[in-house]
Image (spheres, grey):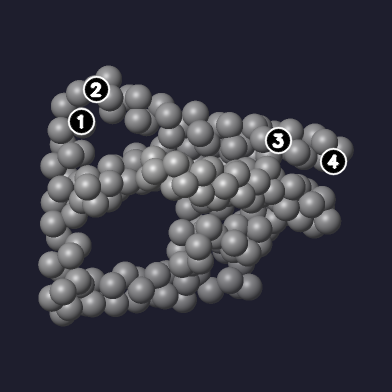
């Protein structure tokens, strides 16, 4: 069922987004994670950045309001996702399980990055690795590239440099981490999918 699959994906995506925002708030404001961002610097015109973000949001809303076919396709999915989310929140055990699984996933990804950095004789705090993973995941979604290929590597390298890792080590750690967490699983998934199709499981 396509609608069910999209709805479940939307719920998982929303819960993951909430977990990531909570992680960033706790790690940055309650911990000692410093990304080296200077919001008072003249080098970055934050007003223009905000204007661009608002412009993109306004263009998205305008397109949604004017294109009837887009509304007809998206609105039912949003409504189904909303109903499913309300139903999920009525069952605290399931809601906590969903949020907990998303949190566990982020912790495992951060742990793998921390171990990669240790392996190349470079070390930052686990909280720093967690922030780098979560922030990269949030920002890569702004660029519509399948799998975040290229975008993820660039963004994470930048975050690691901001956390105090030298550029060469940051790039090496990012590439190694991506191979372990994305490229190898994707390759295995391709062959697994082919096997399932050959045996009529899909």
**Residue at image point 28% right, 24% down:** 94
| Quadrant location of the C terminus in the rendered image | top left
- Indicate the secondary structure of the residue bearing disc 2: helix
Closer to us: 105 or 43: 105
Percent across and percent down for residue 177 are 69, 45
| Residue holding disc 3 | 114
Q: Dot 4 surroundings within 10 Å: few (below 14), some, or many (20 or more)?
A: few
Query: Which of marks 4 and 3 precedes in the sequence?
Result: 3
Question: Do labels 1 and 2 touch, CB within 8 Å?
Answer: yes
Residue tagged by mark 1? 89
Crowd band around label 1 with a 10 angstrom C-alpha radius: few (<14), some (14–19), many (20+): few
* Disc 4 element: loop
Q: Residue at x 65, y 46 (%)?
A: 184
Q: Earlier in the sequence, mark 1 or mark 3?
A: 1
* Residue 50 found in image quarter: bottom left
The foreground one among 196 and 174 is: 196
Residue under label 4:
120
Residue positioned most to the bottom: 66
């Amino acid at each position: 069922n396509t609608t069910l699959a999209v709805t479940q994906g939307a719920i998982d995506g929303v819960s993951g987004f909430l977990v990531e925002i909570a992680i960033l708030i706790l790690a940055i404001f309650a911990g000692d994670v410093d990304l080296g961002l200077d919001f008072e610097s003249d080098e970055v015109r934050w007003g223009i950045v905000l204007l661009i973000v608002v412009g993109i949001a306004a263009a998205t809303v305008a397109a949604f309001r004017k294109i009837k076919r887009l509304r007809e396709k998206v609105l039912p999915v949003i409504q189904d996702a909303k109903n499913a989310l309300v139903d999920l929140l009525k069952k605290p055990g399931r809601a906590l399980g969903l949020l907990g699984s998303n949190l566990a996933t982020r912790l495992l990804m951060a742990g793998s990055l921390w171990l990669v950095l240790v392996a190349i004789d470079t070390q930052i705090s686990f909280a720093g690795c967690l922030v780098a993973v979560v922030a990269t995941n949030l920002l890569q979604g702004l660029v519509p590239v399948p799998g975040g290929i290229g975008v993820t590597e660039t963004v994470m390298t930048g975050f690691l440099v901001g956390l105090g890792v030298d550029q060469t080590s940051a790039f090496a750690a990012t590439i190694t981490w991506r191979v372990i967490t994305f490229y190898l699983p994707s390759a295995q998934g391709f062959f697994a999918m082919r096997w399932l199709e050959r045996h009529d499981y899909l």
